Image: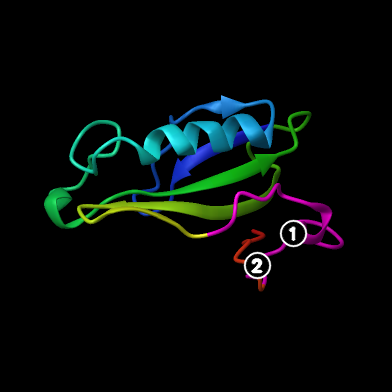
């Protein structure tokens, strides 16, 4: 299972997806929405100077959301527009933690918690 999270504001609720491709399609849709319109308008008081940083997290659906496998920031939205932080590549075996979920930042930007 894949979910989209605004990591800047620790906000959930941007959808659950069966595939990485579905999650990326939603990020592409979010990239077309202006920074000051929902759902891109940041939920903080300083929203005019802030914006979401959307990440895709993959979970083991059999265990639930507490079994995060990998977490990768992909898209930042600001008043200057959308910035892609990574290529639209699938979360491959190379991006996954060896030996379980840890807390290392990988060279590819993936964070394993």
First of labels 2, 1 by sequence position: 1
- The answer to whether marks 2 and 1 mark residues whose Cβ atoms lie closer than 8 Å is yes
- Callout 2: 10 Å neighbours few (<14), some, many (20+)? few
Residue at horizontal 44%, vertical 31%?
Answer: 14
**In what quadrant of the picture does the N terminus appear?**
top right
The image shows residue 37 at horizontal and vertical percentages of: 20, 34
Return the mark for residue 23: none
Q: Which residues are magenta?
A: 86-106
Residue 84 is inside the magenta segment:
no
On screen, 24 above or below 86?
A: above
Left or right of 9: which side holds 79?
Answer: left
Query: Which residue is disc 1 drawn over?
Result: 95
On screen, 49 above or below 30?
A: below
The image shows residue 54 at horizontal and vertical percentages of: 44, 47
Mark 2: secondary structure: loop
Return the mark for residue 108: 2
Task: Please count the marks in the image.
Answer: 2
Q: Please, what is the dominant secondary structure of the magenta stretch?
A: loop
Left or right of 46: which side holds 3?
Answer: right
Distance between the Cα atoms at labels 2 and 1? 7 Å
Left or right of 15: which side holds 82?
Answer: left
Mark 1: secondary structure: helix
The image shows residue 68 at horizontal and vertical percentages of: 67, 46
Residue 91 is inside the magenta segment:
yes
């Amino acid at each position: 299972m894949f979910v989209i999270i605004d990591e800047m504001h620790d906000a959930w609720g941007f959808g659950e997806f069966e595939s990485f491709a579905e999650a990326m399609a939603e990020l592409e849709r979010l990239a077309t929405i202006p920074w000051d319109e929902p759902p891109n308008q940041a939920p903080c008081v300083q929203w005019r100077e802030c914006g979401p940083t959307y990440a895709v997290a993959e979970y083991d659906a059999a265990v639930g959301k507490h079994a995060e496998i990998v977490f990768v920031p992909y898209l930042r939205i600001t008043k200057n527009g959308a910035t892609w932080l990574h290529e639209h590549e699938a979360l491959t075996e190379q991006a996954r933690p060896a030996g379980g979920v840890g807390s290392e930042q990988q060279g590819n930007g993936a964070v394993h918690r």
